[in-house]
Image (cartoon, rainbow, N blue to C red):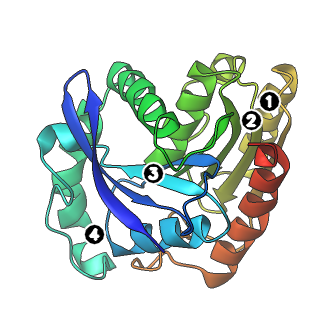
Amino acid sequence: MPTKTLHIPTEDGQADAFAAFPDGGERHPGVLMYADGFGIRPVLREMARELAGHGYYVLVPNLFYRHGPAPVIELPEYIGEEVRSAVFAQLMPLIEAHTAERVLSDADAYLRFLTTQPEVAAGPVAVTGYCIGGLLATRTAAAHPGQVAAVAAFHGPVGADGPDSLAEITAQVHFGHAESDLTPEALGELNQALDAAGVGYTSEIYPGTVHGFTMSDTDAFDPAGLKRHWDRLLPLLDRTMANS
C-alpha cells in the first residue's frame, strides 16, 4: 500500500498530511479523512490504509498544522484514562483556536489539493471524520455542496452548529453516534433537522459504545463499534463514488 507524507498549501502556510492509496498507477476516488482531536498517529494511518485498500485515495491532514507538524503534542502509544486529562489539557487550546473560519479556509485548501493529485479520479469526493473531525467533515460537506458526494461522521458533535447548518448538505450522510454522546431524544431532534433539510441520510446510535469507540489506542475502543463503522462507511462510499 503506497503512502506519502505531503504538504498542503493553505492561506496560513502548509499543512502536513498523510496519504494512502492503492498500488498500480490507476486513479481512484478521493476521500478527505479528518482525524479526531489526538491527530495523525499510527491508528489513523492504519485506518487510512484500510480504507485505501478498498479502492480510495485517502488524505489525512494535520488539523493543527499552525502549531507545528504532527504529532503537534507528544502522545503516548496508548491513550489511557491515566494520561487522558493531561493530554487534553494540551489539546484544548489547539481545538479552541481552530475556529469555524479556519475550518472552512482549510477545507477549501484540502479539497483543492486532494482533487489535483495525480492518483485521484475526476468527480466528486467523500469526507469522513472522527470526534471533532466529524464536525469538520459535516462543515466541509455543507460548504461544498455538489463536490462532496458522501459524508460520514463517527462519535462527532455533528449538530453543534444548529439545525440550519445542515440545510446546504447535498451529500449522502451517515452519522454513527456513541451511546454516551447522544440520547435517543437528541438523536430524534437531529434526524428531524436532517429530514427538514431534505438530506439523504442514516443516523444511528451504536449500541454499547462510548465517545471515541473507533480508536483502538484508547480505552473507548469497541471492536464491534469499529466493525459497524466499516459496515456503514464502505457501502456509503460504494454507492456514491462508483462513477468516480
Q: CA distance from mark 4 to mark 3?
A: 26 Å
Report whether residue 46 is seen: yes
What residue did someone put label 2 on?
Answer: 190
Q: Which residue is mark 4?
A: 84
Residue 38 visible from this viewpoint = no
- Dot 4 amino acid type: Arg
Horizontal side of residue 58 vs 26, given as left or right: left
Q: Nearer the viewer, residue 25 or 161?
A: 25
Q: Count the marks: how many?
A: 4
Give the Cα distance between marks 2 and 3: 28 Å
Q: Nearer the viewer, mark 1 or mark 3?
A: 3
Determine which of the numbered discs, if any, sits on residue 194 in the image. 1
Alpha-carbon span between mark 1 and mark 3: 27 Å
Q: Residue at x 20, y 60 (%)?
A: 71
Q: Residues within 10 Å of mark 4 (few under 14, many from 20)?
A: some
Badges 2 and 1: C-beta atoms under 8 Å apart? Answer: yes
Cα distance between the residues tagged 2 and 1: 6 Å
